Image (cartoon, helix red, strand yellow):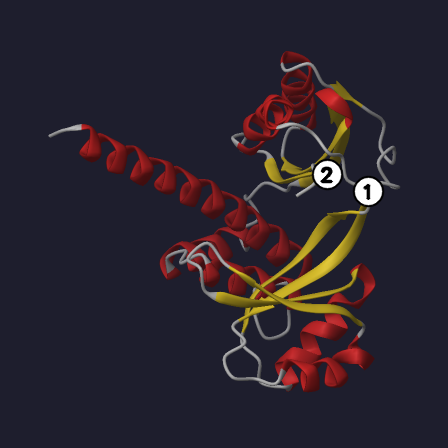
Amino acid sequence: MGRAFEFRKERKFKRWAKMAVQFTRLGKEIVMAVKAGGPNVETNSRLRTAVQNAKAVNMPKDRVEAAIKRASSRDEKDYDELVYEGYAPHGIAILVETATDNTNRTVANVRSYFTKFGGTLGKTGSLDFVFSRKSVFTFEPGDRDLEELEFELIDAGLEDLFVEADEEGKDIAVIHTAFEDFGKMQKALEELGIEVKSAKLERIPVTTVDVTEEQAVEALKIVDKLEEDDDVQAVYHNIAG
């Protein structure tokens, strides 16, 4: 059928693999949210956020409902949320957020990825000066006056509001606020009737490292390997650009 067909097939498989990983991570987040605050979306803000994020990546509704039901069972395992910090080659900082039911397995895997590709695993807190934890919300701006919206959200802790293109090239509005102001900003957006596309706690690099394309490829081998691990929820690095 030709190289074009093979190329399209490879891209499709990669997209499916990425979706499967996203669904697994969101399923874990839903389970942890239910165990922390119960199965009611209306009264559990963490669960409401997890379901919202699942909807944003088109996670099937039956999978979301199954995760909530599973989490309500006493037999469902608990997950420990752990953070690992280290360096890839060329001084690139990497921070890894995990959710695991077996900490020995997780730390062994994470350490092996760093070691295999020339990196080093560091101590917890060693990258506090490199990354700042922020609340990040996204929504479709439409014809909304964003300058006016900025004034309306100042009391909710707004630090930054800007527009960028998503993977499909569509405009998406992005809000940054302090980690501590997540709930306040979420409530403010709900009160303004803004349909949030995603709401997450992310690690934003405060300092970045300029590297060549070859150096970036070498360092990102660790990131790619980490992102394939079922225990990993998110990976952050500080490569400039």
In the image, which disc is placed on residue 221?
Answer: none
Q: Position of residue 21 (x, y in %)?
A: 47, 40
What SS does tag 2 mark? loop
**In terms of depth relative to the viewer, which is nearer, 134 or 164?**
164
Residue type for callout 2: Asn
Query: Badges 2 and 1: C-beta atoms under 8 Å apart?
Result: yes
Q: Circle 1: is it few (<14), some (14-19), or many (20+) Cα within 10 Å?
A: few
Instruction: Name the residue furthest front.
Output: 212
Above or below, 187 against 61 in this view is below
**Residue at 39% in and 37% down:** 17
At label 1, which amino acid type do we have?
Answer: Thr
Task: Please state, as top left, top right, bottom left or bottom right, where the N terminus lies in the image.
Answer: top left
Give the residue number, with chain letter if any, for mark 2: 238
In depth, the one of 179 and 3 nearer the eye is: 3
Q: Residue at x 82, y 42 (%)?
A: 207
- Which label number is shown at residue 207? 1
Which secondary structure, mark 1? loop
Give the distance between the C-alpha atoms of the residues marked 2 and 1, in whole angstroms. 7 Å
Q: Classify 202 as above or below 103.
A: below
Residue 155 drawn at (x, y percent):
82, 81
Quadrant of image for the C terminus: top right
Q: Position of residue 18 (x, y in %)?
A: 43, 41
Q: Is residue 35 above or below residue 16?
A: below
